[in-house]
Amino acid sequence: MKEEEVNRCQIQEWYPKFKSVSIRTQIHELPESFIQYLLDDSGPFLLPVSIYNDDALPNRIHNPEEEEDYQVSEGSGDESEQPSPPPSFPELELKIKESIESLGGAIFPKLNWSAPKDSAWISTTGSLRCTTFSEIALLLRSSESLIHDLCHAYDSCGDKSSSRPQNFFLALRKWYPSLRPEMEFRCFVRGQNLVGISQREVTTFYPILLEKKIELKRLIQQFYEDFERLKFESENYTFDVYVTKDERIKVLDFNPWGAFTLPLLFDWEELEMNTREEGNNVDFRIVETQCAVRPGLKTAVPYDYLDTSTGSGWDQFLRNADEELQRQTRSSEAGA
């Protein structure tokens, strides 16, 4: 694998070419100070100070009662012992707020390659849905999987010259609450030929996929032949798609062939040996019985993150989560 193949899979690289067949997205270049904030684990877990008052999540330390903690009076002694003020990124926050509003008020975030799926547990909704800068920062700062983007993006490259890209970007993708996980698929391209398609969510059996397997395969193959194959420059790669209710195909993501990309219902050895040529049958795999589901990544709340004492940031966060659950329960009962 070469660096250029990995770079093509960055969302800021492929999205402009596939904008017409993808999810609406706004992309912002991130300042280096924000990247260092994401990587910094030397102090307490702090959320950035917001320039607005409408954020749902409180900053872990910064509040009016503790303002004096950040005041350094004359003769107070060694300034190095004073607590550092919480981070603030007003220009970035303003741009993100404007983008969220333009995308309908809710988004899900991702960096150059990865989304913080492993930190969804920390959200009050248990998902990647965000409506504020603070919610985005919380998901990004809590994610272990994003360390790949930040520090190890080129580890599998034979021509590796750096551990990270020159610039990082934050993609804000429009949130659609009605998306169905069973309609997301990963496609495997080898030698510019589509050789395999796999159900993306392999931890669940969806009977509807058995009913629509032939039609779904036809739709994805046709999309690849008509649109996708002419625009993506790598010989070997994978791409994820979503099939809408009206049978349109939406490109969700691109990933390099092999390395850190999951083969899902395939294994890389069999895909490597696949030499199908254009026009031949494509192997389309789904979970066909309840007994065939694959285990998923289990995520637990890190104990070190929990400070639930009265008045703490996490005490308030858990209150917000409880209120959100009650709101959803009332909404569900009202719609029943």
Image (cartoon, rainbow, N blue to C red):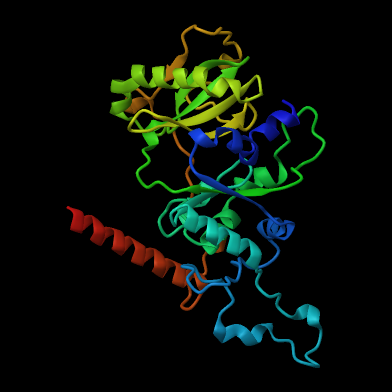
| Above or below for 139 versus 176 | below
Residue shown at 62% from the left, 84% from the top: 67
Instruction: Compare residues 291 and 97 and report the one nearer the observer.
Output: 97
Residue shown at 62% from the left, 25% from the top: 232
- Residue 237 in sight from this viewpoint: yes
Query: How many numbered circles are shown?
Result: 0
| Above or below for 76 versus 48 | below
Instruction: Compare residues 74 and 34 and report the one nearer the observer.
Output: 34
State left or right for residue 127 relative to residue 246: right
Instruction: Compare residues 40 and 87 and report the one nearer the observer.
Output: 87
Instruction: Compare residues 200 and 131 and report the one nearer the observer.
Output: 131
Q: Quadrant of the N terminus?
A: top right
Looking at the image, the residue that sits furthest to the left is 336
State left or right for residue 20 relative to residue 205: right
Q: How far across and how far down the image is residue 279, in percent?
A: 50, 7
| Above or below for 57 versus 261 | below
| Above or below for 320 versus 122 | below
Looking at the image, the residue that sits furthest to the bottom is 75
State left or right for residue 1 relative to residue 116: right
Residue shown at 55% from the left, 30% from the top: 262
Residue shown at 65% from the left, 48% from the top: 169
Residue 270's quadrant in the figure?
Answer: top right
Q: How far across and how far down the image is residue 110, in percent?
A: 57, 47
Residue 212's quadrant in the figure?
Answer: top left
- Residue 302 in sight from this viewpoint: no
Q: How far across and how far down the image is residue 159, in percent?
A: 80, 29
Q: How far across and how far down the image is residue 275, in percent?
A: 58, 8
